[in-house]
Amino acid sequence: MNAAFSIDNPRIEGPDVVYAELQNVLQDLDDHQAERLLFRLIFILCNQIGDRDTVLASIKAAATNPSEPTQQEPNHV
Amino acid sequence: MSANAQGVASGYTLPNYEPVIPPAVHSGEPEELSVVIIGGGLTGLTAAADFSRRGIPVVVLDDDTTVGVRGASSRGMVYAQKSLEIMDRIGVFHRMLEKGVTWSVGRTMAGRDEVYSFDRGASNVSVQPAFVNLQQFYLEWFLVDRIEELGQAELRWANKVLKVENAEDHALIEVDTPEGGYRIRARWVIDASGVASVSRNSLNIPTHPVQTADCWCICDVRFHRPMPTERWTYVEAPFNGNRAVWQHPMADNVWRLDYQMGADKDAKEAARPEVARERVREHLGPDVDFELVWVGPWQYRTQVLDEFRHGRVFFAGDAAHVMSPFGGRGGNSGIQDAENLTWKLTMVMLGKAPESLLDSYSDERREAALENIAVTSRTARFLAPQSDRERRLRAVVLELARQYAFARPLVNTGQLSEPNVYTASRAVSADGGFCLPNLRLGHDGHSLPLMSLMRDLNNRLLALCVAGPEDVDTDVVQEDDALAVRVLGGRNPDLIDPTGQLLALTGAQPGDVLVIRPDLYLAGRAPGADSRKVADLVARAKGELQ
């Protein structure tokens, strides 16, 4: 996993603002509209991160089943 | 004008070669040969021509009596720069350039909107252009002519291989001809016979095939409407039911139009000339007169061998690996397989390197095949989403690509063939393993392409001692019949790097020694002050280190 990747430490100042903004943009959308927005957001964020290893590590972390230990590598899809 | 089995005018007259009946058919005695190439297709003929140019006699066995595939006017058609460089060394590039269509610009369309384009010409540092499009049978034809001109190889048409067996110091090949069978005891065999390899089956070698359901249909079409000589790819073509379409120019005013049909289509129905004509008319518009040259449905599949060498038998091209055709990676990788194996086997046969060098063929070309399969499979999946959610994911990419430049490279219509990087080969060091372009060096006041330099070194590796303001000590590396030594730059140069591209690509500093292989791959770089590291690098490039 990339040395720059950090899953345990909060890195955003004022995360409540980010969370609230996501709530705002999603609140009036149906499931397909919400999915479209989130897909767009993911691609934009991936580009902002800019480092492929960090993006791939993030995808793996997101795909890890919450009931599994976080150290375990998820299966490749 | 002839007609093929599907009733479509081909407009091509292919050569017909006489069947060859070797004396062993009548003598009954096994024939002893050094190198036998099974298959006179693109990979096999490239290997035969390359061996011929290197002075190694070979025999090619082909079950047909012509080039290309009987009944099919063309298959592969994009030749990327690395292949063009190889063909230049072999001596057929000038014919490709004269007959084919040179291009460097590719455009990707979503609907009628351009969402992405590239121009490989702008950044080109090679003597050869980025791409030449040419029907595959033409290139095979040029290779046959060149092989005959060089006079080192025997092309045995109508010689069908029935069985191959490995023994300790040879392989035994059973061959059938129109006048009967015979046997060959070959010291080395290169199986370049394609997907349906007989020797692979004889030796019980698994291929791990994966077939996809997505169906495509090629329509090679001749028309005279002015069109840019560019590759256009449509992800969602409105004239093809919002499915993908490829549009490539080829020789003779013929265009390769390749239509995605979807998984539920009847392939035979899609390839019926009447159905194909209607599809092309939708594409080109009602006012364009055209002629169908060839129509053929296809589905992609992938497969790869676990090892590309089995005893005395090497597998190359489609006999070793099959991949989706996106980016022209199939044919171009077969050409590179042939080059990789040819120089190594030549050095071994001439006693310039140990047999262990040959094991690096599988290291390198299998890694390349796996990468090519991964790259083309990602393209295939982008073009044929496997669920409604994947389709929506792709729709977002297309939407973003229209809106923002950053998203345009996400529109995956295929990454065109490039030389692969070898990260796990026993014959390169950690800072080598990548291919140098055929860039221009300077020699005696003249421009000297790197490929020409390597060709003239006559089956040797090249150690380049990089000089700075001070003279470089060339005693650190000894020239022999397997290794040439030259000084690059400095006060008394053998060669100069006029643009600095070679130094920039390799990261070489004054005092370094670069070892370059006959296939233009950098074997590695070592500090000239450390004679042990230089010796290790040279030994590694010769395959002496495992």
Image: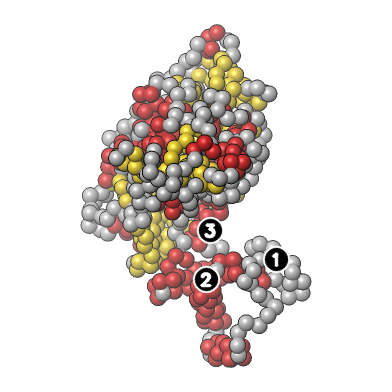
In the rendered view, tell whether residue B329 sits above or below residue B34.
below
Spatial CA distance of label 3 from label 2 is 20 Å
The answer to whether the residues at label 3 and label 2 have Cβ atoms under 8 Å apart is: no
Check disc 3 and report its element: helix, strand or loop.
Answer: helix
Q: Which residue is mark 1?
A: A74
Q: Which residue is mark 2?
A: A50
Badge 2: chain ID: A
Chain letter of the residue beneath label 1 in the structure image: A
Proximity of marks 1 and 3: CB atoms separated by less than 8 Å: no
First of labels 2, 1 by sequence position: 2
Which is in the foreground here, disc 3 or disc 2?
2
- B539 or B320: nearer the viewer: B539
Q: Can you say which quadrant of the picture contains the N terminus of chain B?
A: top left
**Residue in the image at 37% along x and 28% along y:** B146
Q: CA distance from mark 1 to mark 3?
A: 20 Å
According to the picture, the residue beneath numbered tag 3 turns out to be B378
Residue at 40% across, 26% down: B147
Q: Amino acid at mark 3?
A: Arg
Bin the neighbour count of mark 3 within 10 Å (Cα to Cα): few under 14, some 14-19, many 20 and up: some
For label 1, the crowd category at 10 Å Cα-Cα, with few meaning under 14, some 14 to 19 and many 20 or more, is some
Q: Tell me which corner region of the image, top left, top right, bottom left or bottom right, holds residue B186.
A: top right
Q: In screen coordinates, is B110 left or right of B395? A: left
Q: Is residue B495 above or below residue B36?
A: below
Task: Mark 2 vs mark 1: give the one in front.
Answer: 2
* Amino acid at pointer 2: Gly
